[in-house]
Image (cartoon, helix red, strand yellow):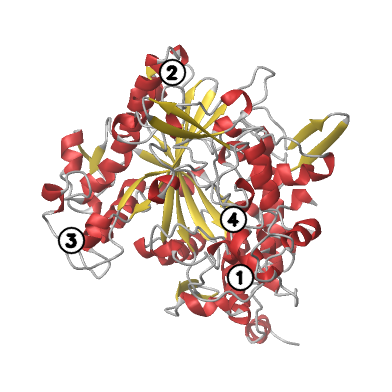
Amino acid sequence: MKTLSSLLIACSLIPVTINALPGSQSAIKPHHSLLIRNKDLLNELSPVYNMGYLLGTVGLRELRGHNSERAVQNIPERYPGMTTTSVGHYVYRIFDMAYNQQLEHNRYYNNSNYSNAKKLGPNNIPASMMMNQVFRGWKQIDNRGNFKKRLSQDQIKTQIWPNGLRSNKFRLLAIVNRMDLADEFDPRKTGSATDLPRFLGEVHLTFGLVDERSQYEDGTNPKPFPMTFSMSYRLPAINYSSSGVSADNASYDFLNNTSDWKKEIGEWAKAWARLSDYSSVTNRNYKTYLKSVLDTVLIPENFIGFRSNTKIRSNEFEIREWYIFRSAIVRELNSDQNLGQLIPRKPRMEPYECLDGSRVLTDIVNHFWQDGSTIANAKKEPGVRGLSDYVKRNYQDLDVHTKVPGLSPQGDNDEYRAGMLVLREKDRPFFKNSDGSYKASYIGASNVGGRYNYFWKSPGNKCGTDERTLPFAMLTGPGRNQPPILGSWSGAKASQLMMLAPFGRVRKNSDGTWGRSWKVSRDPAYSEAKRHAFSIRTCTGCHGQEGATAGFHIYPRLPNKKSAISGFLSGGTESSPDGIGNTFTKKRGTASYTYKYSELAKRKAWLWKFMKGTSGNFVRFKNLQRDDLK
């Protein structure tokens, strides 16, 4: 008979198999691998991955130059406001410019008797103060994490190092895996991470603003301040192991090769899926693995951009974006061509509100949709040197269903490469007559005091007819009192007439619905998919009824709570504070179209597919196509 000790010795010799990756799609845990929002974990990580500090590291890189040499010091003196002298000033200006834009917006509409613009926020906080809340009560934390002192705005501007910007002013709400954005592309090339498509996807860190006055003024019913921020970073190539990830120093250009792309995206899929193998997100090994992921990604070279979402009234949200601006003046004074300041930019997915339902919007949507009839019509366009050339030069492909692999590094046709950007400029063939002039049905002109003002045609002239009636978003020049075009239509001035918006506004409608379901005119029923594809990709559409939500997709939270998420993300498995489910129904005449969302389930299936590498016929960019269009 074998003794107990001999049995133990025999058992110890048997190899133990540890399942380091989920063995089935159902074993992938969304809140381990896709959208991490455990409050205890995030409270622990907040001091490490602090928003002020992360923005400071971006600022330090821009101030020093990407070659780590100190930027020239005489820029502020020669060109006031074009750049910054410290990391603190760099971060301060991010919010200060948006604050000043709010002031301008308020002054403009108050002078025009738009009384609803005078007060914002749940407690009637003046509109000019909403973005300014970021500065109030900014706290400095010492190396041990202890509160030291409250910093004034001037003190913030004097901070030299990113560590000086660490504070509990921002609360980490969620860490979001956005591998599903693989191959997404922003052709504006505002920073290092946007020069090429985000081949392997992104990571988003979502933060809430901590404001004690708002949070605790009602002791019986405390509420978090209704403002969130999101920082986005591209995923770099990595070396995967079951114990953690590390950066692969390979050039991004090699990812144009689809076989290399399959391998690298599979590595990232395994890395994210690996997090589901741990029983708890508060497990020490889980935190170690997650930290290896974040430390690999969250470096200034991978920084893409910055967004905010604020409930400015009980019935209105404001959505903003910031990107790095490469000033020609900075390039003149510094050999580093990439040096820049993070400034509020026009949201790239948001057209002018006044164009809703216009013929302009309809034809842009139709123009960017590639299907059989579009391609057939393309052959008829004058001056086309073959269908391939025309498609490359003129189509964004809104549905992303005709994209093919084989991108060339730094290719010359940005629209053809990837992404879901809704292009907004007026230089499209259907806006012009055969002689190159602009069609009067799209673009109008008026003579005011000997000056010609050009403007978009829209229903009821909602886009105005001169500088006295143009919406605030369309005004340019000193004090924003100039229309987009003055004088003759020629040269650089002509390019100013674009479908831009300084921010998006999601408003509650009279029927109780929230936000826009963008309308297009003269659009037959069969092209409802076109309208929806366009609307769901705009800022205000995704954060409104088209995306089955009312402003927030990830909600602000109190310190002892977990952030709620929208039905769009949860698929209806969780109740959102807005009381909205996960479906949106669009009625057009007698027809009715219902879209049902379960975004985390979609991303889970996508992650499993790439982790297993089971698809031998990967078609790139298909991941950018919305499933609800099928």
Kind of residue at disc 3 = Leu
Mark-to-mark CA distance, 3 and 2: 41 Å
Q: Residues within 10 Å of mark 3 (few under 14, many from 20)?
A: some
Which is more foreground, mark 4 or mark 2?
2
* Nearer to the camera, 240 or 533: 533
* Nearer to the camera, 371 or 440: 440
Q: Secondary structure at mark 4?
A: helix
Kind of residue at disc 2 = Ala
Kind of residue at disc 4 = His
Position above or below: 296 against 231: below
Would you name the residue on which mark 3 appears?
A: 333
Residue 18, given in percent of the width and then of the height, sits at 64, 74
Would you name the residue on which mark 4 appears?
A: 32
Position above or below: 81 against 368: above
Residues at circles 4 and 2 in contact by the CB criterion of under 8 Å: no
Q: Determine if residue 484 is in view.
A: yes
Would you name the residue on which mark 2 appears?
A: 117
Residue 384, given in percent of the width and then of the height, sits at 65, 66
Kind of residue at disc 1 = Lys
Total marks drawn?
4
Which is more foreground, mark 4 or mark 1?
1
Q: Residues within 10 Å of mark 4 (few under 14, many from 20)?
A: many
Mark-to-mark CA distance, 1 and 2: 49 Å
Which is more foreground, mark 1 or mark 3?
3
